[in-house]
Amino acid sequence: MAATKKNILNKLYVVLVFITLFLLAIILRLSDIQIAEGEKYRSLSEHLTLRNDTIFANRGNVFSADGSLLATSMSQYEIRMDAFTVDSKVFEKEIRNLAKELSKMLGKSDSHWEQKIRKARNNKNRYLFITRKLGYNDYIKIKSFPIFNLGMYKGGFIAEQSTVRAHPLGRVAERTIGYDDYRGAPGIEGAYRNYLNGKHGWRLKQKIAQGQWKPINDNNEREPVDGKDIVTTIDVNIQDIAHHSLLRQLEFYNAEHGCVVVMETKTGEIKAISNLGRSSEGKYYEKRNYAVYESHEPGSAFKVMSLVTALESGVIDTSTVVDTGEGKYRMYGRDINDSHRGGYGKISAARALEVSSNIAFARLIEEGFGKEPEKFINILKGMHLNDKLNLAIKGEGKPVIPSPGDEIWSKNALPSIAYGYNLKLTPLQTLTFYNAIANNGEMLKPKFVKEIRTWDKHVEHFEKEVIDSEICSKETIKKVQEILKNVVIRGTGQKLYDENFSMAGKTGTARTEYGNYAEWIKEKKYISSFTGYFPAEDPMYSCIVVIHKPDTKTGFYGADVSGPVFKDIAQKIYTSNHIINTIDNSTPNFASIKNNFDSYYTESNKEFISIPNVKGMAAMDAISLLENIGLKVNLNGEGKVQDQSINAGEILIKGTTIVLNLI
């Protein structure tokens, strides 16, 4: 009996020794992990459960010349809740009040929200989705709701911020203002991305259940730094005029696409640029930046370049007579035709430009340069017509001026170039040349941006950039200016003449897609244009209008299709006192804009806010401000706010419609 007991005790001792040794091994291993390999496993744990989430900096704003917003970044918030962290007494006391407030803001019943949050609490859900895409005002409001007002740790309130790009002008000038995202980086937004992009911040998050990530604290580890602001040359009022005038004409002629550019003559500043293409549904929108990228044969618009070249070389004078016959002339086995039935007979070179005679220019240039075409081409290239403008905006089309020996050169090349075929220019390249004529020979690079700012602080100012101080002699400039004025008075543009304001310019009508002549005859396609400047005596603005493939049943000549757009723009700029008044090249007072914004911003975050005073504001800014505080906005007119239907200071009732009268 004693022996059996002793054997049992011995076995127990052995087991105890093994257990002790096993425990010692575990302790030693844990010590080794904790001390020797602790840093490794702590790092691995943090890598798997902690991460730095990027907080993207707000891109800088893009402003018009007068300080109106063209593009801005707006904050949006996604709201979630750690339903498990809230104290039980607080939860039971306030859950119904929270549900009631959520119901008012987000819809659905009180009971829906209460049941949803209770279920999340029972399931220990620490990242319950509440809502997304809240604006800043609603974020401030939801943050003050019962339970949520206790913050992240006691109230389980989780808010994650993101930014979206907003364009107060909508899709007007969208391709020129541009964007910088998955679609690429066209326009001003893409060209000046290094200024607009700020420095991103970051926030530490911890991995919780179901692969979700929760912020560890309320503060960011590194705050983002917002980008700088861009002040463009765009004039909102002129842009609005140009856009709607082009749109009306495209719709009337059922054209495929078109563009308008308005340039300030003495500075090269682009005051308006509109590019509209037709969708499959027949609607027009900013499809491509045709003015910048689309190289095409300019047709009769190029006759001005040919005339300048011939005058500069001395092979002709404006009084040189050329015989255009009866409107048809055969050269190198090909017929050249004038649009006027019966022809113009014998006319001067000046008159040839006024009536836009193809025959006259083909004969003048062939007779003057036929034995040495290189001379003609070199003068054109000397006036930078074969050079890109090297715009900051990407996608500029390449000009093509062929030379003898090139693949596309033939016996017909020289006379064809004389009246605008067998070469290519973009609308903006063509306008740059015409603007040089208007600017007494000084060729300026088109300018889209005036300066870079950070609120009221100047960072960089962009002066006018001279491509060539004198593209030709002053004598030639004066002669061509006089002829371009007569084009409107008594030439192909005489339908546009108005005794109340003066204009100068050149019509253009060019065949397009005519390679297969048999097919072209069945469905004729043209490019209609008008390029010029105003006032004719002391030009302040130059402008080009190009419309592709108008319905020929309605019309296709440049004077009929594109000319009225030019006249409409000129007339409205005159009547809105842009011409009468001195041009204001000063930069808007951004300090006052900021102060006004800050004062309203403070007011708008109160629980009850009143109707703000938007008189004098640009329509786009007023709409943005009023809609953000819950009002519906109707507009009468265009421009800036003259009057508002609800007086400033009245109590705000969300959903109310306010009418703004604009001038």
Image (cartoon, helix red, strand yellow):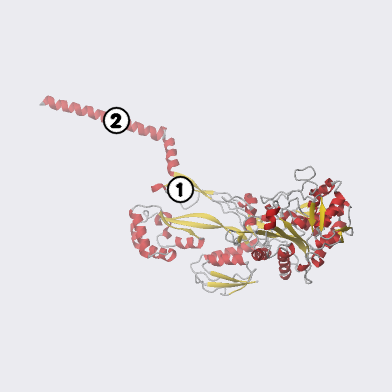
List x then y, in percent, for residue 164. 54, 56
- Circle 2 is placed at which residue position? 22
Instruction: Farthest residue to the top: give it.
Output: 3
List x then y, in percent, for residue 285. 61, 60
Q: Quadrant of the N terminus?
A: top left
List x then y, in percent, for residue 408. 75, 45
Name the mark nearer the viewer: 1 or 2.
1
Q: Nearer the viewer, residue 370 or 63?
A: 370
Say above or below: 77 vs 382. below
Mark 1 burial class by Cα count in 10 Å: few <14, some 14-19, many 20+: some
For the residues labelled 1 and 2, the Cα–Cα distance comes to 39 Å
List x then y, in percent, for residue 617. 62, 67
- Circle 1 is placed at which residue position? 205
Q: Nearer the viewer, residue 142 or 358?
A: 358
Tell whether label 2 touches label 1 (CB within 8 Å).
no
Dot 1: element? strand
Dot 2: element? helix
Q: Residue at x 44, y 36 (%)?
A: 39
Q: Is residue 72 left or right of residue 483?
A: left
Q: Is residue 648 left or right of residue 67?
A: left
Three-letter amino acid code at the position of disc 2:
Phe
Q: Please tell me in which quadrant of the rendered image residue 633 appears.
A: bottom right
Earlier-in-chain disc, 1 versus 2: 2
Mark 2 burial class by Cα count in 10 Å: few <14, some 14-19, many 20+: few
Q: Please tell me in which quadrant of the rendered image residue 474 appears.
A: bottom right
The circle drawn on residue 253 is: none
| Res 478 visible | no
